[in-house]
Image: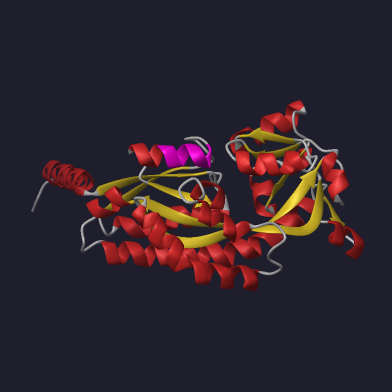
Amino acid sequence: MLNSWTKKFFLALALVAAAAFEARAQDAAVTLKLGTLAPQGSPWDKIIRDMGEEWKASGVLLKVYPGGELGDEPDMVTKMRTGQLQAGVLTVVGLSQIDKGFSALSVPMLYKSDEESDYVRSKLQPLLEKRLLADGFKILNWGDAGWVMFFGKNPILTPDDLKKAKFFIWGNDTDTMNIWKSAGYSPVPLSATDILPNLQTGLIDSFDTTPLSALSFQWFPLAPNMTDLKWAPLVGATIVTLKAWNAIPAASKPAVLKAAAEAGKRFKDEIRSANAAAIDAMKQKGLVVHEVTDEQYAQW
């Protein structure tokens, strides 16, 4: 029989061997760095990390940079182009930096329901995926962040109310900024990562986003009036650079795609229900939801 010292020796040897094996396995694995604005601990973040856990078994390691750690979505696209990032979970704002055709999926006031949004996306999806592939990116899944609503320090019930507001728009989106300004509005171009500090300083007093985003980023306490108006669906996708995709072993790709597809379904199903829950949660913390009348809706 082995004495106590011998048992400890062999146990230590086994642990060292296991650690060495793990190190060799990780060295041999393909590592993808993924950026996202989704805050750590948010429903989006959980889905992304669950997808990464599934990828591990296929020899693909996913390192997630949440909450805009590596900048706004346009910054992430730039980092993917230069190889600093290999993947991203982006909304149409970031995707439109690659191909402006993605903007068609979130045109304000064009869509009235999830069904309409899903239908249009299903028709445009093959074309947009093909165009993105030609630009060096592969779409792994689609999803959405919910319906964009207006949030303000003061209620925003009509377009005239919005004209009095200092509202956020994405800083790199000069086309949208020019459209707003030409109609008499005063948008403030910023990075999405700068919304909270500029709400605190008063540079902006309103923004448009999904309820779940307003809750997850804790923006709503500084703009506690939400307009119950479906401004636009915020569609998104998980993308990877073609260079990184080609580096994944062919035998691993089916499992990677399967896990990504499952995550895409969760992005759609779980996030939509989470937005409704987010409104209820914010109401309990002081959010006031303002319904719009038929007359006010017509003005929009």
Q: Is residue 262 left or right of residue 175?
A: left
Q: Is residue 12 above or below residue 201?
A: below
Which quadrant is home to the C terminus?
Answer: bottom right
Residue 263: x, y in percent? Answer: 46, 63
Dividing the picture into quarters, in which one does residue 84 lie?
Answer: top left
In magenta, the rendered stretch is 72-78
Q: Is residue 238 left or right of residue 18?
A: right
Q: Nearer the viewer, residue 275 or 150?
A: 150
Q: Is residue 7 left or right of residue 111?
A: left
What residue occupies the far left of the structure in this picture? 1
Residue 103: x, y in percent? Answer: 57, 54
The chosen color scheme is secondary structure
Q: Is residue 225 above or below residue 133?
A: above
Dividing the picture into quarters, in which one does residue 231 lie?
Answer: bottom right
Which residue is rendered at x = 31% and y = 49% of the image? 61
Decide whether the magenta segment is chiefly helix, strand or loop.
helix
Q: Is residue 7 above or below residue 164?
A: below
Whether residue 146 is visible to the viewer of this picture, yes or no, is no
Whether residue 54 is visible to the viewer of this picture, yes or no, is yes
Which residue is rendered at x = 63% and y = 32% of the image? 194
Q: Is residue 92 left or right of residue 49?
A: right
What residue occupies the far front of the structure in this picture? 182
Q: Is residue 218 magenta?
A: no
Residue 199: x, y in percent? Answer: 73, 33
Numbered label tally: 0
Q: Nearer the viewer, residue 1 or 17?
A: 17
Residue 127: x, y in percent? Answer: 44, 65
Dividing the picture into quarters, in which one does residue 37 lie?
Answer: top right
Which residue is rendered at x = 53% and y = 61% of the image? 143
Which residue is rendered at x = 38% and y = 42% of the image? 80
